[in-house]
Amino acid sequence: MDSLIKLIGANARRIRKAKGLSQQKLGEKAGFDYRYIGFIEQARVNPTIKTLEKVASALNVTVRDLFPANSEVEANKKGVPAKISDRERITSIIMRDLNKADNAKLKQLRRIIKITVGAED
């Protein structure tokens, strides 16, 4: 059970960072003190399903997204840490940077992305 709580905390942290949120901001959105968010991420508390629902809602994900895939649980049981892919790491950095940009910069970046990857509205 402890390994599951650790993986849930690690997933919550990974998703929070990918969304460019601080523990303070996530705490405000979910209705918790930022220290409690830290405790969840560090597996220092055993959060209730209701708490996970509030955290997931504040992150705009489902509660299921906070739970690890079966392969992550099995890997963790064998002492292999869950890895963050290069894509997740890069996405996290981009999201953090985007949260600092004003609307004009975001519009400009959107045009660049559309040209670069051929994305449509």
Image: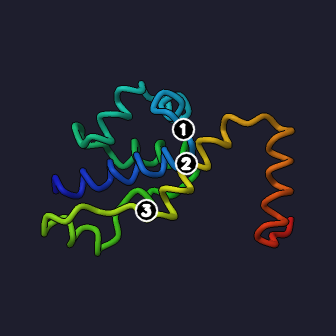
The disc label shown at residue 93, or none: 2
Figure check: 72 above or below 50: below
Query: Is 67 situated left or right of 112 in this image?
Result: left
Q: Is residue 40 left or right of residue 89?
A: left
The x, y position of residue 113, in whole percent, is 78, 61
Mark 3 vs 1: CB contact within 8 A? no
Query: Quick one: quadrant of the C terminus?
Result: bottom right
Tell me the quarter of the picture where residue 73 sits.
Answer: bottom left
| Label 2 to label 3: alpha-carbon separation | 24 Å
Residue type pointed to by label 3: Arg
Mark 3 and mark 1: span between their CA atoms?
A: 20 Å
- Quarter of the image where the N terminus is located: bottom left
The quadrant holding residue 105 is top right
Mark 2 or mark 3, earlier in chain: 3
Residue 101 spot, x, y in % from top left = 73, 36
Marks 2/1 in contact by CB < 8 Å: the verdict is: no
Q: Is residue 53 left or right of residue 83?
A: right
**Residue 37 x %, y %:** 38, 34
- Secondary structure under badge 3? helix
Image depth: mark 2 or mark 3 in front: 2
Vertical comparison of 39 with 59: above or below = above
Which secondary structure lies at badge 2?
Answer: helix
Q: Is residue 8 above or below residue 44?
A: below
Identify the residue under disc 3. 64
Residue drawn at x 53%, y 51% as measured from the top left: 92
x and y percentages locating residue 15 in the rendered image: 48, 51
Q: Residue at x 28, y 56 (%)?
A: 7
Identify which amino acid the numbered label 2 is placed on: Ile
CA separation, marks 2 and 1? 11 Å
- Foreground residue, 62 or 38? 38
In the picture of the structure, the residue carrying the numbered disc 1 is 21
